[in-house]
């Protein structure tokens, strides 16, 4: 028992040391980029482009659109790099927020299409309260999201992936909370149907 506790302590210390070392490496990389080091820019791009691209894929209807949004987002990230403060969060969290806001700004310009709110209480109509993200492959979810109407997709992303509540979504998109709730409910039905179609196709 004592031996197991010592091993656990050793592993915990080792993990902490490695974590701090990686953190120091990233902080140095960001500092170099802030100073205009082109190689540091490339290293940061290579390190985070796949993660940020995954966000863009969720908000857009095609890979081409997502690629355009990734490039626009990365330009903004590097342009605003001087404002990044490690004491206020990780670089990924800071960068992801810029990526999300860049995608939302683009969607607003393209006039996101929201379905009209139905007269009856939609919650009584859509009784299938399944967990839409349970046991799904990431690639299938992204493919299904890209099939969605833009209103469904945007609200679904903000609610499930970004953790916004309906009041926050309404403020971000300039709609009512009831519209946000309607889009979310319909998006879940749409997602389930699309994923079922994918399964039948395979």
Image (tube, rainbow, N blue to C red):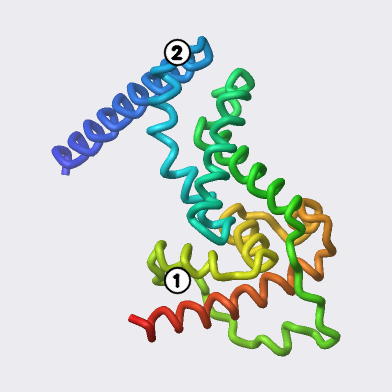
Of labels 2 and 1, the one closer to you: 2
Picture residue at 52% right of the left edge, 73% below the top: 132
Q: Quadrant of the N terminus?
A: top left
**Circles 2 and 1: CB atoms closer than 8 Å:** no
Which corner quadrant of the image does residue 185 belong to? bottom right
Which sits in the foreground, 159 or 192?
A: 192
Q: Is 133 on the left-hand or right-hand side of 175?
A: left
| Position in image of residue 122 (x %, y %) | 75, 83
Residue at numbered disc 1: 134
Q: Quadrant of the C terminus?
A: bottom left
Quick one: which residue is furthest to the left in this view? 3
Density class for disc 1 (Cα within 10 Å; few <14, some 14-19, many ≥20) is few
| Position in image of residue 18 (x %, y %) | 29, 27
Picture residue at 67% right of the left edge, 86% below the top: 126
Secondary structure, mark 1, is: loop
Q: CA distance from mark 2 to mark 1?
A: 43 Å
Which corner quadrant of the image does residue 68 belong to? top right
- The numbered mark at residue 5 is none
Density class for disc 2 (Cα within 10 Å; few <14, some 14-19, many ≥20) is few
| Position in image of residue 28 (x %, y %) | 42, 15
Which sits in the foreground, 123 or 189?
A: 189
Residue at numbered disc 2: 37
Q: Is residue 115 above or below residue 145?
A: below
Mark positioned earlier in the residue sequence (2 or 1)? 2
Picture residue at 43% right of the left edge, 27% below the top: 44
Quick one: which residue is furthest to the top in this view? 35
| Position in image of residue 159 (x %, y %) | 64, 60
Q: Is residue 45 above or below residue 113?
A: above
Which sits in the foreground, 155 or 144?
A: 144
Secondary structure, mark 2, is: loop
Picture residue at 50% right of the left edge, 52% below the top: 64
């Amino acid at each position: 028992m004592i031996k197991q506790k010592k091993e656990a302590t050793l592993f915990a210390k080792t993990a902490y040391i490695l974590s701090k070392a990686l953190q120091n490496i990233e902080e140095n990389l960001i500092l170099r980029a802030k100073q205009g080091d082109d190689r540091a820019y490339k290293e940061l791009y290579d390190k985070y482009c796949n993660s940020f691209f995954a966000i863009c894929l969720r908000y857009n209807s095609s890979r081409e659109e997502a690629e355009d949004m990734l490039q626009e987002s990365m330009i903004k990230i590097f342009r605003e790099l001087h404002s990044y403060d490690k004491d206020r969060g990780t670089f990924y969290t800071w960068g992801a927020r810029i990526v999300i806001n860049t995608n939302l700004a683009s969607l607003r310009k393209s006039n996101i299409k929201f379905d009209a709110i139905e007269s009856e209480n939609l919650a009584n109509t859509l009784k299938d309260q399944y967990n839409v993200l349970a046991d799904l492959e990431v690639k299938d979810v992204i493919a299904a999201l890209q099939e969605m109407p833009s209103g469904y997709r945007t609200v679904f992303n903000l609610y499930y992936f970004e953790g916004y509540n309906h009041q926050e979504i309404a403020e971000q998109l300039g709609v009512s909370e009831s519209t946000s709730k309607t889009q979310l409910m319909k998006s879940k039905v749409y997602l389930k149907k699309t994923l079922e179609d994918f399964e039948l196709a395979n």
